[in-house]
Every structure is written in C-alpha cells, then in structure tokens.
Image (cartoon, grey):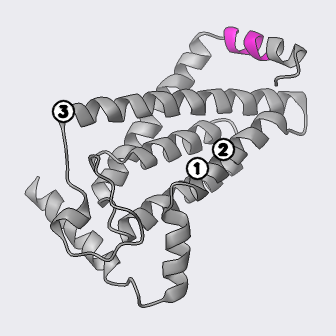
Amino acid sequence: MEALLSIDSAIVTWLNQWMGEWGVVDKAAELVVSDYLVPTLMSLALMSTWFLARDPSDRAANQKGVLVALLGVGFSNLTVLIINQFYFRDRPFVGHELEMLFYQPTDSSFPANPAAVAFAIAFGVFLYNRALGVALGGLASLWVLSRMYSGVFYLSDGLGGAAIGVSITYVFSLLMRLIEPLPTTVLSTMRRFHLA
C-alpha cells in the first residue's frame, strides 16, 4: 500500500510541476477540470444519442446504451457514497504543496466520483455505439488527467472511480439482456408518446 501511495504522490507532483510552464495547457486544463464542461458535453451526447440515429434499429440500440449508462451512473454514485462512509482519503493538495486550478473539495479523494460517472457514461454508450463510446472515453480520461494535473485527485483515485463506473455499467448491460424483452417494450411504449 505504501508503494502505491508513493507512486500516486510522485505522479501528481510530477504533473503539477508543469503548471505555469505553458499558459495554453493551463487554460485548457482550467476549462476541462471544471464541474461543468465535461458533464455538459456528456449530457448533450446522451441526449443526442437518445434521439438521433440513422435507422430504427440504431435508435433502439442507442437508447438501450443510454439506459445502461444512466443506470451505471446512478449506481456508481451510490457505490462511491457507500465506500466514502467507510474510507476517507485526503486530496493531494492536503499533503503536498501544489498549484491549484480548481477549488479544494473536502470529500474523500478515493474513489473519484467524477471518474466513476464519466466512465459509466462512456462505457454504457460504448457497448451499443463504439465510435461515440470511444470519444466519450477519451473525454473522461482527459477529465481525470486534468484533475490529477490540478492536484484534485491521485491516479489511483481516478482508476478506482473508472473501475467502479465500468464494472457497474457492465453488470447493468448484462441485466438488460437478461430481462429482454422488457427494455424493448418500454422503449416502444415511450416511442408511441414521442419520448424516444
């Protein structure tokens, strides 16, 4: 465990040392690290995935992907909340002198809730729409990296959150297949009311 903490600390301090060296990178990181840009882009991606498709079969697959992603998000949040009741880890800026681009959160650093949410969305979409899922996975990775660069959480926090998001979303994708034709029936009913 000490080795992991040492590696985490080394990575965060190495990344953070570059802050102030390249203004463009700092400005980009300041934009990406926020609580707004990535969640807004992912929400817009989910909405467009829900409503836009080339044909009815693509639309049905996309909508199942959105349902799986949303279930993954909800239960990943719950999992992080439960873990945080039993385990608290200080943020990197508490134990290290780091430059900050972001406010100083007071909740537990591990597991990283933003990583759990972002990777739940990316993986849920990926299971049904590979190209968009890969793009969202890249966006989720960029969010995690910007938060490490800004001293908000460690690499293991991001990896732990990502693992939670992906694994819980995968479980819901399996459950969705098990309870078929219920998801298809629900989506068909929603289409009759122009909700899908």
| Residue occupying the point 41% across, 87% down | 20
| Residue occupying the point 59% across, 18% down | 176
Q: Amino acid at mark 1?
A: Pro
* Above or below, 104 relative to 64: below
Can you give x and y, in whole percent of width and height, for residue 55 in the image?
A: 90, 33
* Residue behind mark 2: 43
* Secondary structure character of the magenta stretch overall: helix
Q: Amino acid at mark 2?
A: Ser
Can you give x and y, in whole percent of width and height, for residue 63 in the image?
A: 73, 29
The answer to the question of whether label 1 and label 2 lie on touching residues, with beta carbons closer than 8 A, is yes
The span from disc 1 to disc 3 (Cα, nearest Å) is 27 Å
The span from disc 2 to disc 3 (Cα, nearest Å) is 30 Å
Q: Which mark is residue 39?
A: 1
* Quadrant assignment for the C terminus: top right
Quick one: which residue is furthest to the left in this view? 2
Can you give x and y, in whole percent of width and height, for residue 22 in the image?
A: 48, 89
Q: Write down the region rendered in magenta.
A: 181-187
The answer to whether residue 21 is seen in the rendering is yes
The span from disc 1 to disc 2 (Cα, nearest Å) is 6 Å
